[in-house]
Amino acid sequence: MFVLVLMEDCLAKKMEITVSEAEKRTGRNAMNMQETYTAYLIETRAVESQNEGQCSPVDSLWRRYSEFELLRNYLLVTFPHIVVPPLPEKRADFVWHKLSADNMDPDFVERRRIGLENFLLRVASHPVLCQDKIFYSFLTQEGGWKEMVNETGFQLKADSRLKALNATFRVKNPDKRFTELKHYSDELQSVISHLLRVRARVADRLYGVYKVHGNYGRVFSEWSAIEKEMGDGLQSAGHHMDVYAASIDDILEEEEHYADQLKEYLFYAEALRAVCRKHELMQYDLEMAAQDLTSKKQQCEELATGTVRTFSLKGMTSKLFGQETPEQREAKIKVLEEQIQEGEEQLKSKNLEGRDFVKSAWADIERFKEQKNHDLKEALISYAVMQISMCKKGIQVWTNAKECFSKM
Amino acid sequence: MEFYCKASMSSSSSMMVTTRAEFDLPEYSVRRRYQDFDWLRNKLEESQPTHLIPPLPEKFVVKGVVDRFSEEFVETRRKALDKFLKRITDHPVLSFNEHFNVFLTAKDLNAYKKQGMALLSKMGESVKYVTGGYKLRSRPLEFAAIGEYLDTFSLKLGTIDRIAQRIIKEQLEYLVELREYGPIYSTWSGLEVELSEPLEGVSACIGNCCTALEELSEDMTDDFLPVLREYILYSESMKNVLKKRDQVQAEYEAKLEAVALKKEDRPKVPTDVEKCQDRVECFNADLKADMERWQNNKRQDFRQLLMGMADKNIQYYEKCLTAWESIIPLLQDKPETK
């Protein structure tokens, strides 16, 4: 899809990766019911040995979409500071009427194959992601890969869905850059969705305009039958009208690639948002931990000095039912002091984690921004080129028709 | 005689018809309303029943929300009326018609209209040609062929009219979507930094294509459809003339038969039957001549019309091509070069 800019020591430079085929399979699913699915052939070949003039062997294995999803989820959890490349859409969306919304449709499968290959190339050319062993095994190890992924226990590390989606927790001091970026990713998703929706409608309408011209072909032909001198000119002009009407199919098929390029960035916006979200979660966690530490320190102080500054149920009950003994108080203070020490260490490491995260996430975000600007510019250029080609075809056809008319 | 028809400056309901007899003589102008043209046409049909009279643009505009006072409508009508007059001028018989002459020269046409029959010329009085009730047994082959041709011809034109209308409709619906599509790139441009100019450029480009498309649809509506419809009316006129011819022939044949039944020894053909025969022969000759003329004009008119349609489409695509080609450098521009 896009021409990828390859980093020096990424996997993509050492290994040729293609998703070369798609095949329909039937099997039994988890509930032992028969299902049909598509399997994709991943072929890999080491690049180095080509320099020696010999072709290295091609390794291959079959994977289905759900395995790609598993891989991506693993990467999302394992590298939360990375804007993880998205997968092509699960179901056909933003379709104009001639395109099938059926997952089994050969055109959809073909575009998905390209999208999956693109996904693998993106991961393989990412300086951090390409080094992951699970990713490497995905490409090279047919059997037992699923078990290997699950054994990493990544699902446990995943932030609870509730926390991740909960929009109502308030972060007091987020890094402003991430807040702005999250806002940007929301807007980007919104504008690209809108664009894709309307583009599909535009395609539909354009299809209609071209196809109606085909009717001219038929009527000119019928008319030419009753004419003497005008007949030939009409007949051949009619042929050009047929050509014109037929030309829209290829034009719109090519435009689908542009739509796919936009879709990739629509989904990338989601990945970007996830990174910002992760920062917010970490920051929230940090703030909660700090708050907790502060309150514990306060409790400790109160117990030590005997002053009650903050209301606590325990304090009230002890007032009502009698004070604690000095020994009990000492024990409590000791526990609290331990907790405070633990808390301070945790806070320190959380702070460090937070700062590391911000640093590495921002580095990847800068990399992503550059990639995005480069890719989208390329997409716009190719779109303009498509439009130019369509205009030239139009001029050609109508010039031919005009010549036929002139001979009438 | 040379003349041309100018649309009036002040009002949309009357046309200025200007004539010039010879190159070095001054122009002569009269003001005429649509109803005057209508009157002229009726008079021509009455006084020259054996000839094909060119059609007028439709009296009432039925379709759509056409503004009868809009510039486009007035211009379309002006062109059609201009063509009407030119066709009469080009006709070797009609161009010398008395009513036509009066139409072009009389300062007060209404007074002339009221005079009625007073100034009718001797040739081809309408009264004499009112034949009725005679049924023709069979049309001669050559006229049957013309009739069949005209039937198919108007059918095909009707189909082309429908197709053209459908295309315009589809184009306008396409335009509606494009008008929503372009500005989205603008909105997106507002979110971006480096991509801001390229995206804005694409938005502007789509806007230009919208304008070009609008112009194409307007042109087709104003220039293409009216001419098509005119020719459908023309074929209807011709079919009517054919029917009149049939009537004349039927009358002749009936009278001839009546004479034959009388079984006279001297089968001298009475004068009124002779006159009928004359009439049939004249009519046939006129009609054939008109048909040939009509076929030639039709060929030229359609060549021009269809080439014009092709031209408009070429121009549309050229405008879009220019727009898209001009933004390629903008899209390829590297930020460092700014």
Image: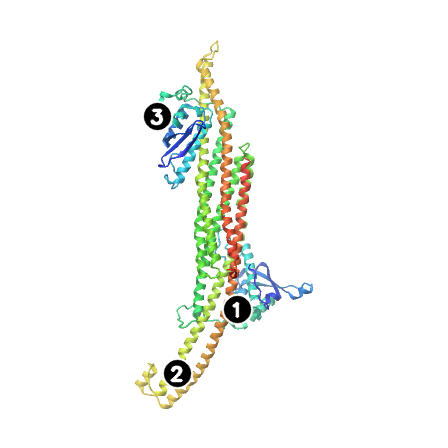
Amino acid type indicated by mark 3: Lys
Residue for point 53% across, 50% down = A388
Of B1 and B140, the residue lying toward us = B1
Query: Mark 1 sits on what residue?
Result: A75
Of A65 and A371, the residue lying toward us = A371
Report the mark closest to the observer, 3 or 2: 3
Whole-Å distance between the Cαs marked 3 and 1?
Answer: 94 Å
As drawn, which residue projects farthest toward the left? Answer: A320
Mark 1 element type: helix
Of A133 and B178, the residue lying toward us = B178
Identify the image quadrant of the C terminus of chain A: top right
Q: For residue B113, which numbered disc appears in the image?
A: 3
Query: Mark 2 sits on what residue?
Result: A297
Amino acid type indicated by mark 1: Leu
User: Residue A222, how many percent across, how many down?
Assistant: 53, 36
Whole-Å distance between the Cαs marked 2 and 1?
Answer: 39 Å
Query: Against A159, is B108 above or below?
Result: above
User: Within 10 angstroms of label 2, few (less than 14), some, or many (20 or more) residues?
Assistant: some
Residue A286: which quarter of the image?
bottom left
Amino acid type indicated by mark 2: Lys
Q: For residue A365, which numbered disc appears in the image?
A: none
Whole-Å distance between the Cαs marked 3 and 2?
Answer: 114 Å
User: Residue A224, how many percent across, how many down?
Assistant: 54, 35
Q: In the image, is A119 to the left or to the right of B70?
A: right
User: Residue A267, how many percent across, how many down?
Assistant: 49, 62
